[in-house]
Amino acid sequence: METNYRSLFEAARKAGAALGNLPAERLSDAVRSAADMLRSHMPEILAANAEDLAAMDPASPLCDRLRLTPERLEAIAADMEAVAALPSPQGETLDAWTHPNGMTIRKVRVPFGVVGMICEARPNVTADIFSLCMKTGNACVLKGGSDARRSNEAIARALHEALRRAEIDRAAFTLLPSDHAAVGELLNAVGYVDVVIPRGGAGLIRFVREHARVPVIETGAGIVHTYFDAAGDVEKGRRVICNAKTRRVSVCNALDCLVIHRDRLGDLPALCAPLAEHHVTLYADREALAALTDHYPAELLRPATDDDYGTEFLDYKMAIRSVSSLDEALAHIARYSSRHSEAIITEDPLAAERFTRRVDAACVYVNVSTAFTDGGQFGFGAEVGISTQKLHARGPMGLPELTTYKYIVTGDGQIRTS
């Protein structure tokens, strides 16, 4: 049966207009109900997810992103409840002033209306985008990846049950078919969809940017660096580097390249020792390779190529580049970074200040793992994605980033005479 996309988008537009007029507490209640429904539908969701996983190549790095467990579903539900508990940004006055003629001007947050989302094998995003859009009074139209089709459909059934119980139009959350045609329809839904947010690899994001006729907020792929400075502390470096690389290799904040000052190459074996326990393959330049030879498992050592420095590995793999100065480190990062998350390990406050001022990234860390680039860790409850662009939103996108604003001008009969 052919999908009537126009009717779906029209229904979402109507539902979005209605959501924008509902009390904030009613929207929060709907999000809490959705969290309860995820828990009560857990067996069905896990069974659907198992079918999706069985159809995927087990060697694919996307498997970890796709996989749901009781613990992960419980964490997703808890994140939804955290979103529900946050203050609503809707209707917030951002600024206000009085004109010389006596009229008042207020800048007020309002929902976008309809948010379109395109993602790959990430069923957690289905619940995240629902809770964030519902809390901000936006309707959501989601195009999920075919790899996660069964998981997304099972989650959507739970979310629609929550909407039914809350007496909210089910079109407030629309899951599009998982085929490629749905992408084109969503990207061309001018007049119905206010913004589209892609969440996935570089190829997906590039496709959306090049083909969308509706506005796009890019949540970029993560090519993430950590620079170990001449004044870096080895014990801090060991912990931070290992955590950033191995906590969860399939996520966009995972470390892809260690940049190390040449004066500290003697410490490289100690810095990388914890990585060997996780069987991380290292792609090292000539000097780093020499420093690691006989100190790191030979079967996990490879000479680096230029391509390795621009790769988001999403796997137990990491590149290493040696540099002679902070400036050279910054130049390397500027060349290969996706402007997502970058870190420095240093005890030199001047080096830290220069790094944070000069590096161009949404999130910049000093002596901290890049694994913290996450809406939940930033206190946002959940996130739509990590925006790497500089217009409207940057970094983890929480509730405020799903709003725009309008000006409300109030007076007492003032007219303009010039």
Image (tube, helix red, strand yellow):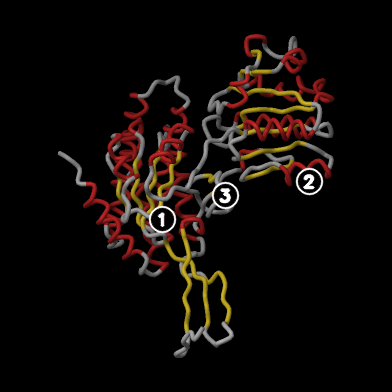
Outermost residue, left side: 1
Q: Do tag 3 and tag 1 residues touch (Cβ < 8 Å)? A: no
Residue at screen point 27% across, 39% down: 177
> Secondary structure beneath disc 1?
helix
Please say if 127 is above or below 264.
Answer: below
In depth, the one of 382 and 389 nearer the eye is 389
Q: Quadrant of residue 24?
A: bottom left
Q: Nearer the viewer, mark 3 or mark 1?
A: 3
Please say if 305 is above or below 333.
Answer: above
If you read the primary sequence from the N terminus, does the residue marked by circle 2 or circle 1 appear first? 1
Quadrant in which the N terminus is drawn: top left
Residue 120 falls left or right of residue 189: right
Q: Nearer the viewer, mark 2 or mark 1?
A: 2
Residue 196 falls left or right of residue 311: left
Given the image, on which type of amino acid does mark 1 rest? Cys
If you read the primary sequence from the N terminus, does the residue marked by circle 3 or circle 1 appear first? 1
Q: Circle 2 sits on which residue?
A: 353
* Cα–Cα span, label 2 and label 3: 21 Å
Number of the label disc, if any, that sits on residue 390: 3
Q: Nearer the viewer, mark 2 or mark 3?
A: 3
Number of the label disc, if any, that sits on residue 142: none
* Cα–Cα span, label 2 and label 1: 37 Å
Given the image, on which type of amino acid does mark 3 rest? Lys
Q: Do tag 2 and tag 3 residues touch (Cβ < 8 Å)? A: no
> Secondary structure beneath disc 2?
helix
Given the image, on which type of amino acid does mark 2 rest? Glu
* Cα–Cα span, label 3 and label 1: 21 Å
Q: Circle 1 sits on which residue?
A: 133
